Image (cartoon, rainbow, N blue to C red):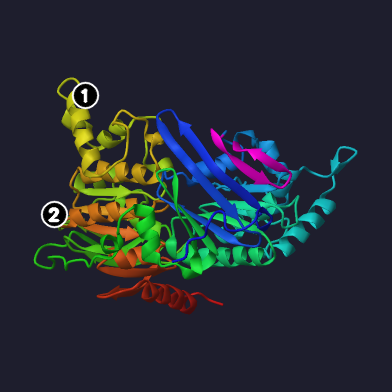
Amino acid sequence: MTDVSLASRPSRDYTLEARGVSKRFGGTQALDEASLLLRPGSVHALLGGNGSGKSTLIKCLAGVYRADSGSVVLPGYDGPAAGVTPSLAHQAGLRVVHQDLGLFDRMTVAENFALDSGFPTTAGRIKWRELDKRVDELLEEYAIPARPRDPVGSLRPAERTLVAIARALQDQRDSEHVLLLDEPTASLPEHESAALLAAIRERAAAGQTVVIVSHRLSEVMDVSDEITVFRDGRVVGNLVTAESDASDIVRLIAGKDLANGLAAALPAPEIRTVEPALAVSGLAAGPLSGINLTLWPGEIVGVAGLLGSGRSSLLKAVYGALPRTAGAITVGGRALRNGGIGDALRAGLAMVPENRLADAALTSMTVRENMSVSVLRSFWRGWMRHSTERRTAADLASRFQVKTAGVESPFMSLSGGNQQKVILARWLRREPSVLLLDEPTQGVDIGARAEIYGKVRESTAHGCAVLVASSDHEELAELCHRVVVLDQGRIVAELDGEVDASDITYAVQTHHSLETPA
């Protein structure tokens, strides 16, 4: 592992230089003397846990936050970091593409471009041909297989991200600007991520400087040239990717060795001596057709498949959020009526959905309220026993290693990983017989991921069965006893025993190519 000295090369070798940047929010030191040097024509990855400081540094460089101290050198600017404003950063060529792409699905590609750059007009009329011609040139330049009049919602996920990138860079074609990508692959399945990362590499080869923030270490190792690792607001490592080892990077991110925690062998579940925890027979719902699946107490079963294969639909159908049109579901040997989520909860099911903020979190409420909402009746004695509720919430936060100033803190003040741990704690405190997890560690750092895996495994020791839908095949290989593969709403393969990520990827791609008509 080779450390890149921050003072080893003259300034002219860099597109951007940030040195000694600090930022404090109240009593929290979000950035502490952080530095970053970006080389032209390179992909530079920023790694670190949630709340480690990497996003704060990006916002200081983009002028969204005003830094407390430090210096920045940009094209046309050499001065204090506190002097960087959004307009200055934009003039200097910094472009940020956030995880929320800010695209309008019902509008065309050309209209989305024009919303950012303006519509060409004459005598009060939009010159559509001129707009289409300009956008068509950009689509060709960025190798995006789309047409100006295509609705953005009709594009594949990776193509949508490329449209957002091309839109951000449409007013600058040279290599003097810096493209900052915040978690660009967080919501993409593996094959879409691979397509996007290949496009990013092509941009770098053409002279573009790219910064990518990601929690997916394997992707970072594939796409980046250099890596900067943050922890607790400080830069703890500057690495050349080709000369670095993944275990060393994990150690820098977490401050300890988590390799064994992530890849620890799962004990074989005590199964097939009692009723199945969950039995699905002939299930049809939404895109699903003829699903047969059995989970036994203490077993973790993964669900793999490409986008649109039915992964999330399977979990929603079992949970009652997607009405079934055929088939039967039993929980612990008892038939589950097609009565919606209420029946599922009474039968002992719990679900952590893919989009925690939209579908699970009480975003305007506190950590305590988010943890307690699943068991409110236990605190009611003609009045709410708030002191008992606070005490049990604090104990739960401690057991689930939720990093928070206190249980009365706003839920939205937590990092993504800690938000996910709160939602998981909410449901595991009910001791469910079946836990449904949809993309459980999406956008979660490697340390929080290990802690979430630990709590999921701990639940199985008490007989809970877990069904996990994930586009992250490494996650499925690390966490599950077996994996089923979906394609076009049907189970087309099942992998058991010692399964690795490559086995899952091969099964997903092979069965998709066999089952999908040309």
Q: How many marks?
A: 2
Q: Earlier in the sequence, mark 2 or mark 1?
A: 1
Q: Residue at x 28, y 32 (%)?
A: 368
Residue sitting nearer the eye, 266 or 103: 266
Which residue is the site of mark 2? 462
Q: Is residue 205 left or right of residue 420?
A: right
Which residue is the site of mark 1? 386
Disc 1 element: helix
Residue placed farthest to the right in the image? 123
Residue sitting nearer the eye, 362 or 80: 80
Q: In which image quadrant can residue 232 be found?
A: top left
Where residue 7 appears, as percent x and y from the top left, is 57, 54
Q: Is residue 351 above or below residue 501?
A: above
Disc 2 from disc 1: Cα separation: 29 Å
Where residue 487 appears, as percent x and y from the top left, is 43, 69
Q: Residue at x 27, y 56 (%)?
A: 453
- Label 1: few (<14), some or many (≥20) within 10 Å? few
Q: Residue 251: say if magenta.
A: no
In magenta, the rendered stretch is 67-81
- Label 2: few (<14), some or many (≥20) within 10 Å? few
